[in-house]
């Protein structure tokens, strides 16, 4: 014999399961497994058949569960379901404002990166605080000082057909302030930069991204020539490559083996090395 309260919870759980089964194509499409995404693609091409079969399966599942419960019948379940929908429809207007605020909040959270990109704020760190900081009591020992070395840029678009580009680089990474190189006047479409900037890098933060902007200095302000976004996994790989060379970095192809494609056009060669104590930077690099 099953307690009446437990019977109610079993029905609620079964009802939620049936609703979730209707959303199975969307759920599988969002999974990382290639087989699940392939299955979602196969179902999306046969949606009428899928929903028709799922309706029959859900009705059969609910009928068997209700028949198993001693205090419930299928007509009783349908009556409670209709009564619940009627109560929900009668109170939905009272909750309209709250529901709209919750939906808007979920939308902003789900598409925050897209919204920031549309507003041109995807590279900006508006709040220098994350949930990880609260959980770690704002400890700063997770940050590792690194030096970003920028060798050259090539194949840049021209901002003005009558003037050569005056190139400089802006770097954005996490909580660091905006870092800029000096302006290389009349550099044109190709520029040997040989610049370095020091930054704090959190290796364990998978959301940490380095944004590099190739800018052209104008009489008023600057114009973006290209940009690249480098994720934390690529940054860790650059640091490993720098460590393998034992700090022996030269401004040559042998030291800068990785180039990144700029958007909309161009390439940039960068690498990174960890900064140790008593470190004086790469200002004395050979200019070969």
Image (spheres, rainbow, N blue to C red):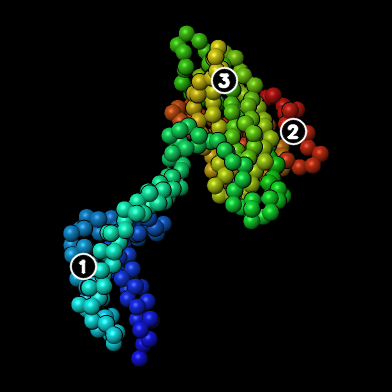
Report the Cα–Cα distance between label 3 and label 1.
62 Å
Q: Residue at x 45, y 27 (%)?
A: 265
Query: What residue is drawn where x is 78% and y is 33%?
Result: 280
**Would you place residue 223 above or below residue 273 in this image?**
above
In depth, the one of 104 and 54 nearer the eye is 104
Which residue is under mark 1?
55
Which residue in the rendered view is the most extreme toward the bottom? Answer: 1
Question: Which secondary structure, mark 1?
Answer: helix
Q: Residue 32: image x %, image y %?
A: 41, 57
Query: In this image, 77 relative to 263: left or right?
Result: left
Q: Mark 2 and mark 3 in contact (Cβ < 8 Å)?
A: no
Mark 3: which secondary structure? Answer: strand
Give the mark nearest the N terminus, 3 or 1: 1
- Name the image quarter holding residue 65: bottom left
Q: Secondary structure at mark 2?
A: loop
Q: Quadrant of residue 231?
A: top right
Q: Which mark is residue 281?
A: 2
Structural crowding at the residue carrying mark 2, measured as other residues with C-alpha within 10 Å and reported as few (<14), some (14–19) or many (≥20): some
Q: Callout 1: 10 Å neighbours few (<14), some, many (20+)?
A: some
Identified at 70% across, 51% down, the residue is 139
Residues 236 and 120: in front is 120
Specify the label residue 110 is tagged with: none
Image position of 112 with respect to 41: above or below: above
Gap between marks 2 and 1 measured at Cα:
67 Å
Cβ–Cβ below 8 Å for labels 3 and 1?
Answer: no
For label 3, the residue is 167
Q: Position of residue 254 (x, y in %)?
A: 62, 35
Image position of 100 with respect to 154: above or below: below
Kindly indicate the quadrant of the structure image that contains residue 37.
bottom left
Residue 96 versus residue 211: which sits nearer the camera? 96
Q: Could you tell me residue 91's position as x and y percent?
A: 32, 58
Q: Within 10 angstroms of label 3, few (less than 14), some, or many (20 or more) residues?
A: many
């Amino acid at each position: 014999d099953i307690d009446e309260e437990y019977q109610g919870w079993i029905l609620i759980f079964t009802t939620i399961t049936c609703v979730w089964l209707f959303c199975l194509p969307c759920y599988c499409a969002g999974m990382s497994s290639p087989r699940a995404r392939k299955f979602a693609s196969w179902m999306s091409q046969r949606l009428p058949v899928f929903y028709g079969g799922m309706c029959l399966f859900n009705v059969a599942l609910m009928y068997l569960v209700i028949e198993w419960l001693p205090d419930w019948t299928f007509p009783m379940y349908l009556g409670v379901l209709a009564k619940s929908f009627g109560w929900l429809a009668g109170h939905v207007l009272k909750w309209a404002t709250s529901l709209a605020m919750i939906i808007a909040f979920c939308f902003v959270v789900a598409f925050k990166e897209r919204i920031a990109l549309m507003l041109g704020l995807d590279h900006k760190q508006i709040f220098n605080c994350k949930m990880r900081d609260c959980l770690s009591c704002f400890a700063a020992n997770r940050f590792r000082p690194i030096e970003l070395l920028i060798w050259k840029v090539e194949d840049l678009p021209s901002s003005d057909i009558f003037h050569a580009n005056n190139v400089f680089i802006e770097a954005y990474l996490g909580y660091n302030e905006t870092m800029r190189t000096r302006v290389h006047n009349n550099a044109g479409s190709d520029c040997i930069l040989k610049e370095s900037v020091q930054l704090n890098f959190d290796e364990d933060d998978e959301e940490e991204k380095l944004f590099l902007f190739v800018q052209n200095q104008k009489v008023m302000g600057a114009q973006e020539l290209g940009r690249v976004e480098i994720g934390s996994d690529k940054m860790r790989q650059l640091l490993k490559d720098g460590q393998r060379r034992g700090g022996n970095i030269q401004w040559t192809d042998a030291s800068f083996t990785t180039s990144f494609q700029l958007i909309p056009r161009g390439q940039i060669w960068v690498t990174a090395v960890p900064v140790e104590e008593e470190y004086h930077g790469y200002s004395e690099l050979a200019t070969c």
